[in-house]
Structures are given as C-alpha cells and as structure tokens.
Image (cartoon, helix red, strand yellow):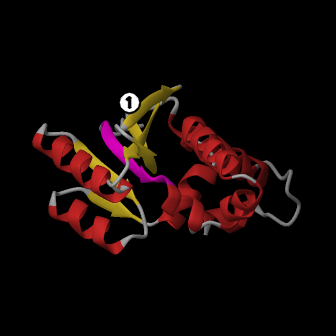
C-alpha cells in the first residue's frame, strides 16, 4: 500500500454543520454538540494519519482562540474576523511553507482562494463520505473475504466458471 503524503486538512466547521442533515438536526438541539460531533468524527477518521487537521469556526473573542484535541487543531476566529479569512490565511501559510493543502467547504469564495494558492478543494459532502467510509485496510479485507466466499462456494449463486470467463 502506498503511503499518502502528509497535508494540512482545513475544515470550514460551521459550513459542514450547516450543509449536512445530521449536524443540522443536532444543531437545533445544541450547536456545541454539533461541533463536538464534527470534531469526534474528524478525530476518528484522521487519528492514524500524518495529516494536520485544522477545523475553523467563527468566534467572537478578543483574540483568535486555538486548542488541540487528539490530533485536531480547533481554531475560533476573533471578533470581526471570519472563519473564511482564517482558512485563507492558513492555506497561504501552508503553501508558502511547502505543505500540501486540502480544504473542505461549500463556500465558493474560500474554494477559489485556496485553489489559487495551489490547494485541493472538496465539498462538505465529500468530507462526510470520506469520514463515514470504512478505513482503507478494512475495505480491502472485506473485498478479499467476499471474493474468497464466492471462489470457495460459500455464496451459493456464485460459480467458479463465472470467474474464469
């Protein structure tokens, strides 16, 4: 298996929450719970990678607030600064330092700026599919098991002759 090159993964936190039904439903109960769930899912997906995962939310503090939770950097923008502008800045800094950037947002302005900086842009739907997919090694094992079940006749509708044709 080929190792994936480390990159900075930038996530527009509230954009993901607003554009996904599961998070939107949870947000009606508690925005803090929706944020926490997003962070937990990012942790679960990226815990065994060398990627730097940064999720950015709009904040209202006097200064930009940053914390780390199990491999995830969480940033709240300062009052008067949007999460979009923080993501644009982080993208420019990462690219100037020679790091690859992958950004998830449906906001066209951020997508355009990150792409201009040489980063890869993806939709929030793509992020959700990526987070909910089985880990790559598990998917490969599952495909192998299914193939072996067919070859050894454990799955009755399968015939070895079908495989040989």
Instruction: Relative to 41, say whether 24 is above or below.
Output: below
Q: Position of residue 6 (x, y in %)?
A: 31, 36
In the depicted view, which residue is nearer to us: 7 or 136? 7
Residue at position x 43%, y 70% in the image: 106
* Residue that sits furthest to the left in the current view: 96
* Residue that sits furthest to the bottom in the current view: 108
* Residue that sits furthest to the front in the current view: 62
Residue denoted by label 1: 50
- Asked whether residue 160 appears in the rendered view, the answer is yes
Q: Quadrant of the C terminus?
A: bottom right
- Asked whether residue 133 appears in the rendered view, the answer is no
Horizontal side of 120 relative to 75 (left or right) equals left
Residue at position x 74%, y 57% in the image: 26
Q: Position of residue 50 (x, y in %)?
A: 38, 30
Residue at position x 10%, y 43% in the image: 96
For the record, the magenta segment spans 6-13
Q: Residues within 10 Å of mark 1 (few under 14, many from 20)?
A: some
């Amino acid at each position: 298996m080929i190792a994936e090159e480390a990159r900075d993964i930038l996530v527009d936190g509230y954009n993901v929450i607003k554009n996904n039904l599961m998070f939107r439903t949870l947000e009606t109960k508690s925005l803090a719970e929706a944020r926490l769930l997003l962070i937990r899912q990012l942790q679960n997906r990226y815990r065994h990678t060398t990627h730097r995962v940064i999720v950015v939310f709009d904040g209202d503090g006097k200064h930009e607030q940053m914390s780390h939770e199990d491999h995830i950097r969480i940033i709240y923008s300062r009052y008067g600064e949007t999460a979009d502008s923080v993501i644009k800045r982080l993208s420019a800094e990462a690219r100037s330092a020679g790091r690859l950037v992958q950004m998830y947002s449906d906001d066209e302005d951020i997508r355009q700026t990150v792409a201009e900086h040489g980063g890869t842009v993806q939709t929030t739907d793509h992020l959700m599919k990526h987070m909910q997919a089985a880990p790559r090694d598990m998917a490969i094992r599952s495909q192998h098991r299914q193939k072996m079940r067919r070859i050894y006749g454990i799955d009755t509708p399968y015939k070895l002759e079908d495989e040989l044709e």
